[in-house]
Amino acid sequence: MKLDSMYQEIILDHYRNPHGKGLRDGDAEVHHVNPTCGDEITLRVRLDGAVVADVSYESQGCSISQASASVLNDLVVGKPIGEAQAIQEAFLELMQSKGQAEGDEEVLEDAVAFAGVSKYPARVKCALLSWMAWKDATAKALAEQPAINN
Amino acid sequence: MTIIHPGSTLAGLLDTDAIRKDFPVLQRVLHDGKPLVYLDNAATSQKPRQVLDALNAYYEQHNANVHRGVHVLAEEATALYEGARDKVAAFINAPSRDEVIFTKNASESLNLVANMLGWADEPYRVDADAEIVITEMEHHSNIVPWQLLSQRTGAKLKWFGLTDEGRLDLSDIEQLITEKTKIVSFTLVSNLLGTINPVEAIVRRAQDVGALVLIDASQAAPHMVLDVQALEADFVAFTGHKMLAPTGIGVLWGRQELLEDLPPFLGGGEMIETVTMGSSTYAPAPHKFEAGTPPIAQAVGLGAAIDYLSNVGMEKIAAHEHAITEYAVARLQEVPDLRIIGPRTAVDRGAAISFVLGDIHPHDVGQVLDEQGIAVRVGHHCARPVCLRYGVPATTRASFYLYSTPGEVDLLIDGLHHVRNFFG
């Protein structure tokens, strides 16, 4: 059934038990909304040198957007910024694939479960909400810390 | 076990078997053989064969630009376009066909009035001393134009709040609508809550202080008898695509003397009397407000839609939807954890019903319903302040029309049980 390709068990698990949820100290904060459905996220990034030390967030939204934020937290916290940015780009590419890509599990880990979501244009924005917020917050944090901006 | 629901024996229903045969898209079968259950009528309605045929016939036989040219097609196109205006005028009981302005949608109609009032001379002019009154249950199209006008002129924007039951709170009407109020603009039927608003009380107060009244009838014109004279408003706006017509055609009705006094909105061809390089004089209404080539085929389609609705009968359509709504409101409340956002009875209520289902996000509700062939709207329905008022980020909305059946309500209820199991 098509629906199961979107709501994979991995996604529902992250939705029911989101990782890293809640706001903690950060170097930069952003607030992003999905104007078509009202989903919202406030996301903070804390950098430690060139490493993503923490990504914390408060959000409201559908299972896809909530699970995606949880997976984001899993994938980028503790990674060098450059590697985290490469993961973000790989996830973006997967979500823009219109169901044609499977995603590289080596890079994306649990996030490959979102491959099925890419077939539903109305839901791609849900999956990308937290990732775009993270990209924005990271750019802001880097801009505010020119000393470590390589 | 087969459960016979009382829905099949509701009083006042239309012959939906016959009506549904007129709507080709309602024959569609979606994923794995599920018949389409179209419950997104407050967003847009489906189109009957009669409207589609009118569009085709227009383009195949009569297509030309209107109000110019002396050839056969130009005259036929003009007669069809102006004939649609006659049909609209009769449908809303307008005193004069010249009071019916074609726009591209209700948003344009509302923006047209807001802009005219910003540019008008006294006594209509909205300026820094003026006040504008709207309500908290408006569609964004009846909020943002007034915010823009307020920002440009310095006028104060005020609004009616809502009760916990999903109705307008009129308790402070005398403080809200005052001698300073230039315009009161409100929706006749809420697109999110389904509430039918008490027009008379608001119009009476507005008239007492000399304020103009604009009624957004987008969710009313498709569903009930709309009589602009009985409403006693100064302007009434609605859109075609929610009432069986194509997209791209809307209506603004306005009282003749106002349309004569107020300045034009867009300038261009068709809205002029004479033009020199220095200045222009304007055509009388309605053409003064219809710059450029209008949506001709769409107006013809709206005329065909009005013929269709009138043949069925607006009173019968309202009775049908009332029966379906009463049944749906009752059955929805059987679903555990379901909370209706809006009136929980069918009294003074239209056929759009919003709800939340426990903590399952409306996007997820809509997705799982879609898998069963059921089309609903999810989100804030372009009425985000209402969501904020009731403390929900979004809702799921089922909305019915003349072709909706009690059986479709039953399928929705079954679908919602399935949603709960899926995310449970």
Image (cartoon, rainbow, N blue to C red):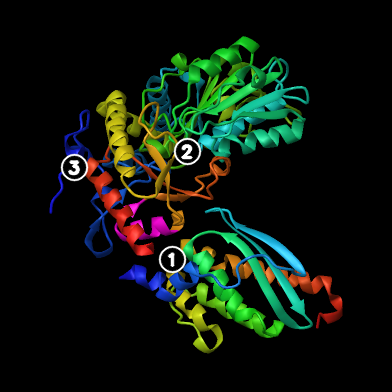
Labels 1 and 2 positioned on one and the same chain = no
Residue nearest the observer in this picture, B391 or B31: B391
Contact, mark 2 vs mark 3 (Cβ under 8 Å): no
Q: Earlier in the sequence, mark 2 or mark 3?
A: 3
User: Label 2 sits on what residue type?
Assistant: Pro
Majority secondary structure in the magenta region: helix
| 3D distance between C-alphas at marks 2 and 3 | 45 Å
Q: Which circle marks residue A120 in the picture?
A: 1
* Chain under callout 3: B
Quarter in which the N terminus of chain B is drawn: bottom left
| 3D distance between C-alphas at marks 1 and 2 | 33 Å
Select label 2 or label 3 by which is in front: 3
Q: Residue at x 52, y 16 (%)?
A: B201
View extreme (right): residue = A147
Pointer 3 residue: B5
User: Label 3 sits on what residue type?
Assistant: His
Contact, mark 1 vs mark 2 (Cβ under 8 Å): no
Magenta run includes residue B365: yes
State left or right for residue A98 relative to residue B16. Answer: right
Position of residue A73 measured from the top left corner of the image (x, y, whole percent): 60, 75
Pointer 2 residue: B295
Position of residue B352 measured from the top left corner of the image (x, y, whole percent): 39, 38
Q: Secondary structure at mark 1?
A: loop
Q: Which residues are magenta?
A: B364-375
Magenta run includes residue B276: no
Crowd tier of the residue under label 3, counting other residues whose Cα lies within 10 Å: few below 14, some 14–19, many 20 or above: few
